[in-house]
Image (tube, grey):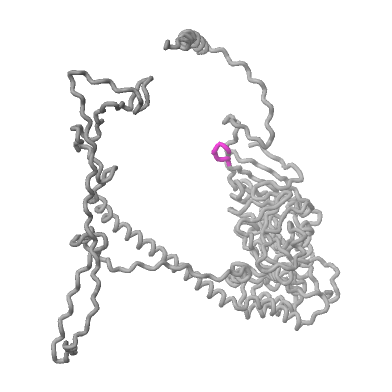
Amino acid sequence: MRPNLTSSVLFAWLLPLCTTALLAQEPDATKPQEPAPPAAEQPVAPADVVPAATEPAAIPAARRGGRRPVRTVAVLASHVHPVAASDIEEGVVLVRGDRIVAVGKQGEVEIPEGAETVRFDGAHIYPGLVDASSDAFLDDAARNDSSADAATPIAEALGRRQDREDSIVQSGITTAYVSNSRGTPWSGLGAIVRPKQNGFSVMPGKEQAGVGLQLAAPPTGTHPLDRQRAIEGAFGAFQGLDDYRKKADEQQKALEKYTKDFADYVAWHEKKNKKDEPAQADAAKNETPKAAGGDDAPKPDAKVPDGTEGGGEAPRGPGQRGNRGGRRGGRPGGDEPAPSPKPDQPKPESPPPEQPKPAEPKPAEPKPEQPKPEQPKPDEPKPQEPKPDQPKPDAPKPQEPKPAAGLPTGAKPDNAGAKPDAKGDEKPPERPKYPKADPRDPVKDTLLKVLDGTLPLRVHLVRPDEVRACIAVARTKKVPGLVFENMIGAASVRKELAAASIACVLTGTFATELPEPFAAFAPDALPKALHDAGVVFAIASGSGRRASSLPLMAATAVGNGLDASAALRAITLTPAEILGVQKDVGSLQQGKLADLLICDRPLLQSDCRVLAVWSAGAVQYESTQPNKEPR
């Protein structure tokens, strides 16, 4: 058959052409490269599509992994009111990032080079206001929910309301305690929020800032004894908490013991496994590996009957063909005749067929001897028990253990000569069982935090008899951290409040028309009465819709005799202390959050106008552009 030369001729003809084409595409290194033509303008990707590649110069420093420079601003004003210190004329508040760095008089506070300077001529700087009671950002469903308990989280029901309550920061409020004032009797866990422009954020770690309890009876239809019984019944929730705490402590101790026992259990088995590793390694070395073909397979050095070494190819006999063949060779064992041997060479004799080796006899397994039933002998006397003065017969010698099944008689197991471990008789520890725990009660867990003093109990009261009954029951139940709210009739019990060291949050200081049972109360004069008695109090709006009236409420107290500095403290530092956030807010001091309220005149004047509000160093509201000096 002629070879096919078509493929070879085509390949020889196309090879030079392909080589020339490839060389023509390669750039000449000796010639300068021409600039590439400008790329066609690409369509702009939509906002939600991130480009696959971006120039490093176009990426902000924060996205490239670099640190964004911290902004340093010096806010200058004609009057600075730190609240925790005396007022400063021609003062400056130095802000770095979200914190206050320094507060002092202009010229005495060193302003770093490159800092931005913002000047408010003739203005007053106050700390951001703190509203100690509000329902801002609380949806209507939560406000009308009367099924809340002590563990209901108010923070989960907060959201933007799409009304004026979303912008309470424009009133200068930078911190607010939000709760539900309509629960009966428990109103859930209040939260502290940070109002922002058209929204808010929950203060970190203050998602649960107080437990609300509504004990104010309606204006009519109740008797003092009925109100007292209602207060005692509400405080009955603290009954039995000692047993609940004891059981919880026992479960905690059991869990700690289980953790320790389980660690010991794991350590014991790890130590045991490490001790057994050398013995297992020695046993593996002593074992002789068997050939791949079994006991009867020939060794690599064994001689086969025809004289060739094991693993070689046996000579082919007549009529046999090898497995290797050429291009036209037939398959192994084909029908083509074998080539005839030359006359001067003897024909190779085919090797005799291998006879199967007789199987070696396996040792017979020893059969356990069957015990023969003993036949009683008539003439054999019965054995007599030894007498006390006679020596006892020798104890029978221990019999040697019988060989294991599968071993010939007289053979010893592999570990017959192994020495027992020093702790071979040590009993392994039992695996500990996970302690069974009773389900936790969220309400009781919350009330335990009240008893521990980590959560304040905020009780809503109105009448003097309600205040007295609540003080007495709380003393009996040993409930610390009480905060009384509203209390428009607390003027007559101000001495009891001062003696019990109970803080008060006043949510109604306007001289409004009250129902007939409350007509004798004077809520606008209450701040002055509590201040003179030494009671710690804060003035709060009580509602998101009245947030803009918070400075006016303080001004009303000033109009009824309260000192202006005490009124200013009642809406800044004192509520921060009641809420437990005085380290961050409430006054203009070094290290606190840069919450600034900037007004065109004193805050408690009726015609005061807010110029700007800063929250944590960020401008949240600005009614006019201040005079910014170049850096």
Where 123 sits versus 234, above or below? above
Where 353 sits versus 567, above or below? above
Q: Position of residue 140 (x, y in %)?
A: 77, 60
Q: Position of residue 38 (x, y in %)?
A: 63, 18
* Furthest residue in direction left, as rendered: 390
In this rendered view, identify the residue nearer to me: 588 or 37. 37
In this rendered view, identify the residue nearer to me: 372 or 72. 372
In this rendered view, identify the residue nearer to me: 603 or 241. 241
| Residues in magenta, as a range | 63-69
Where 437 sits versus 72, above or below? below
User: Is 618 a magenta residue?
Assistant: no
Residue shown at the point (21%, 51%) measured from the top left? 360
Query: Residue 237: in sight, yes or no?
Result: yes
Residue shown at the point (79%, 52%) measured from the top left? 163
Q: Main secondary structure of the magenta part?
A: loop
For the image, the number of numbered tags is 0
Q: Position of residue 45 (x, y in %)?
A: 68, 31
In the rendered image, which quarter contains the N terminus? top left
In this rendered view, identify the residue nearer to me: 95 or 157. 157
Q: Position of residue 448 (x, y in %)?
A: 59, 71
Residue shown at the point (62%, 78%) measured from the top left? 239
In the rendered image, which quarter contains the C terminus? top right
Query: Residue 531: in sight, yes or no?
Result: no
Q: Left or right: 139 with respect to 314?
A: right
Residue shown at the point (54%, 12%) measured from the top left? 33
